[in-house]
Image: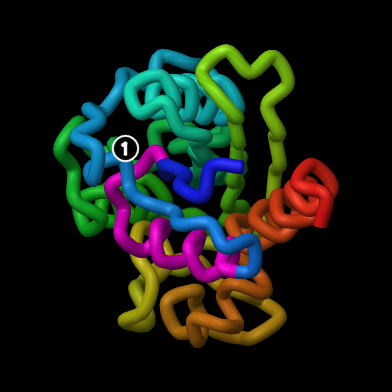
Amino acid sequence: MNKQWVLATGNKGKVKEMSELLNSFSIDVLPQSHFDVSEVAETGTTFVENAIIKARHAAKVTGLPAIADDSGLEVDFLSGQPGIYSSRFAGENATDQDNIDLLLSRLKGVGEAQRNARFQCVLVYMRHELDPTPIICQGTWEGTITDKENGENGFGYDPIFWVESDQCSSAQLTKQRKSELSHRGKALTLLVEKLKVQLGQ
C-alpha cells in the first residue's frame, strides 16, 4: 500500500488534523502544495461534486491516493447560503473576516430563532484518479449564528458559530472538543472506519 497520500488542500489546519487521525495507519499525509499541485476550479454545485473534483485532480497530478474535503456553512434564513461558496462568500480573494462581516450584515436584525445554521463537511478518498468507487463521508454540525464574534481559536466562521451544548462559540472550544463535535471530526471518524475495512485493519 502507498504510504504517502495527498490531501487536496493548502489549509495547514486541515493537513494537521488529517495527519493526526491517519497516524494509526502509518500513512504520511502531505498537502498538495508539497507536490506543486495547482488549485482546481470548483465547478460543482454540491459539496460532493467539488470534493470529488479536488480529489481526482490531486490524484491525477501526483499519482497518489488523494483525500479532499469540501465544507461550508448553511444558514437557514439565507436559504442555505453561503453553502459551497463559504470560503469565497465575500468574493474570490475574501478573508475569513470579510466573509464573517458579510454574513453578519446579511443577518442584521434577524432574531435568534431564525439564525439556525449548520456546518457541512464531505470527505472523499480516491485510490487513484479513475477510482470508480470513491469513499464518500459526510458530517453535519448544528448551531446558530451569533450577532458578534467570540473566541480566538479555529478559523473561518468559528467565532460566530454558537455551540448550544457547550454554551460557547466554536472558536472558544479546545481543539480536542472541537474535533469531537465538528462536522469535519464526524466525517473523519466515518472515513477512518471505512478505511479500516478497505485497508484490512
Up-down: is 25 above or below 190?
below
From the viewer's side, name the closer residue of 135 and 196: 196
Amino acid type assigned to the residue bearing label 1 in the image: Phe
Residue at 54%, 42% (x, y): give it. 2
Extreme residue toward the left, this view? 93
Q: Is residue 79 visible?
A: yes
Query: How far across and how far down the image is residue 112, in percent?
Result: 58, 64
Up-down: is 63 above or below 139?
above
Q: Which residues are magenta?
A: 8-23
Residue at 68%, 26% (x, y): give it. 134
At numbered mark 1, what does the secondary structure look like: helix, strand or loop? Answer: loop
Per the picture, the main secondary structure of the magenta-coloured stretch is helix
Magenta stretch contains residue 19:
yes
Residue marked by disc 1: 89
Mark 1 burial class by Cα count in 10 Å: few <14, some 14-19, many 20+: many
From the viewer's side, name the closer residue of 194 and 86: 194
- Please state if 137 lies on the left or on the right of 120 as rendered: right
- Please state if 94 lies on the left or on the right of 173 as rendered: left
